[in-house]
Image (cartoon, rainbow, N blue to C red):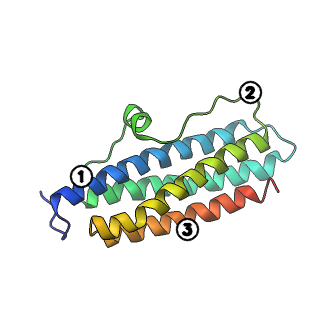
Amino acid sequence: MESRIGINGGHSQSVAELLAKLLADEFLLSLKTRNAHWNIEDPNFLSLHKLFETQYGELDTIVDDVAERIRSLGHFAPASMKSFLSLTHLTEAGREKNDGRGFITELLHDHEDIIIRIRSQINELALSYHDVGTSDFFTGLMKTHEKMAWMLRAHVG
């Protein structure tokens, strides 16, 4: 059934495409954070293990929220590794060491990349696509990523 929520079809499709790319980024970041949680080898193992667990839990919630936002606009969310890898702006990491500084630096970079990307799309969503709801949603996600980045940054000084 067609969604009738006051966003024209072309705008709705464009917004869904932005959300699909964000979903892919969020999914990959969640997976990378889970990898850090599982594979960390560091003198601060326990605190970093817990930090990464907290963060991938938050990211898993974000992934679900983004997918549901796509569905609320009347579109289908991508849901395969192949589609996520084709849509993401992030890269999978090739790690030589599983140390805390390396994981934190990599994850921090990814959060900052997502923050910058989201920030650049907030006004576009509201002004060009007339979707204040998704613009507000992006603002909330940006704030969440800013806090998560702060937590990571605090561990590297």
Q: Secondary structure at mark 1?
A: loop
Q: Earlier in the sequence, mark 1 or mark 2?
A: 1
Distance of label 3 from label 1 (alpha carbons): 25 Å
Mark 3: amino acid: Lys
Q: Is residue 4 left or right of residue 100?
A: left
Q: Mark 2, residues whose alpha carbon is within 10 Å: few (<14), some, or many (≥20)?
A: few
Which is more foreground, mark 3 or mark 1? 3
Q: Earlier in the sequence, mark 3 or mark 1?
A: 1
Residue 55 lies, with reference to residue 42, above or below; the image says below
Q: Is residue 72 left or right of residue 18?
A: left
Mark 2: amino acid: Glu
Question: Residue at left 15%, top 67%?
Answer: 4
> Which residue of the protein is positioned furthest toward the right in this rendering?
43
Distance of label 1 from label 2 (alpha carbons): 40 Å
Q: Earlier in the sequence, mark 3 or mark 2?
A: 2
Distance of label 3 from label 2 (alpha carbons): 32 Å
In the rendered image, residue 82, in percent from the top left (x then y), is placed at 39, 31
In the rendered image, residue 145, in percent from the top left (x then y), is placed at 57, 60
In the rendered image, residue 16, in percent from the top left (x then y), is placed at 29, 53
Residue 35 lies, with reference to residue 60, above or below; the image says above
Q: Which residue is mark 2?
A: 96
Mark 1: amino acid: His
Q: Which residue is mark 1?
A: 75
**For residue 144, which numbered disc appears in the image?**
none
**For residue 143, which numbered disc appears in the image?**
3
Residue 78 lies, with reference to residue 136, above or below; the image says above
Q: Mark 3, residues whose alpha carbon is within 10 Å: few (<14), some, or many (≥20)?
A: few
